[in-house]
Image: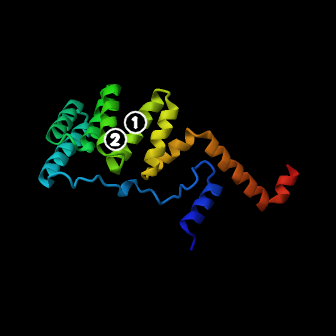
Amino acid sequence: MASEHDRAVLQAIFNPTSPIGDVPGLNQEEELMDDDSAFDPEVVKQVKDLELQGVSSAESGDLPAALQHFNQAISVLPQRASAYNNRAQTKRLLGDTDGAVEDLERAISLSNGTGRSACQALVQRGLLLRLSSRDEEARLDFERAAALGSEFARQQAVILNPYAALCNRMLSEVISKLRNPEVSETQ
């Protein structure tokens, strides 16, 4: 059986546009959890219910109601990152990009850059930074989110890092020439 390192090397060879170490099936984002242990479980339940109502309102197209639910969740438990992350999505959809970025930065700060909310906030902020042509800052956010397990963030980090893609592509060409020397001689 191949080790994790072996799978990473094979992935780099057969998929030269993916970042080195990006092995399909190892996406950890779904497994990430926010640490709510510092909060009263009843209050967390109340806040999660408000967030679910906000998500439901947003999905049905009622963005003002969604914003109201997320504002309530934040007023009940302002130290919890998740509602800021959700409110940022709503603010972005309402055209308030600056407000969205402020909420994302608050979510990242409150989560100490760890957990599901941090990962999602980093990806969202990275996308907003890309829209503002701030690619270097976006790349850094995508790299942080990738380290937390986001496969999407890994892909975005590669897109913004042409050197990594170039190195992987060159490695793939060398391996291909080693495997098929007669093809490279005729070209």
Q: Which mark is residue 108?
A: 2
Residue 55 occupies quadrant: top left
Residue located farthest toward the left when viewing the structure as drawn: 42
The residue that appears at 50% across and 47% down in the rendered structure is: 154
Name the side, left or right, on which 17 lies relative to 97.
Answer: right
Name the side, left or right, on which 37 lies relative to 89.
Answer: left
Percent position of residue 94, x then y = 30, 27
- Residues at circles 1 and 2 in contact by the CB criterion of under 8 Å: yes
**Mark 2 element type:** helix
Please, is residue 130 above or below residue 51 in the view?
Answer: above
**Mark 1 element type:** helix
Residue under label 1: 125
Looking at numbered disc 2 in the image, what kind of residue is underneath it?
Answer: Ile
Looking at numbered disc 1 in the image, what kind of residue is underneath it?
Answer: Arg
Dot 1 or dot 2, earlier in sequence: 2
Residue located farthest toward the bottom when viewing the structure as drawn: 1
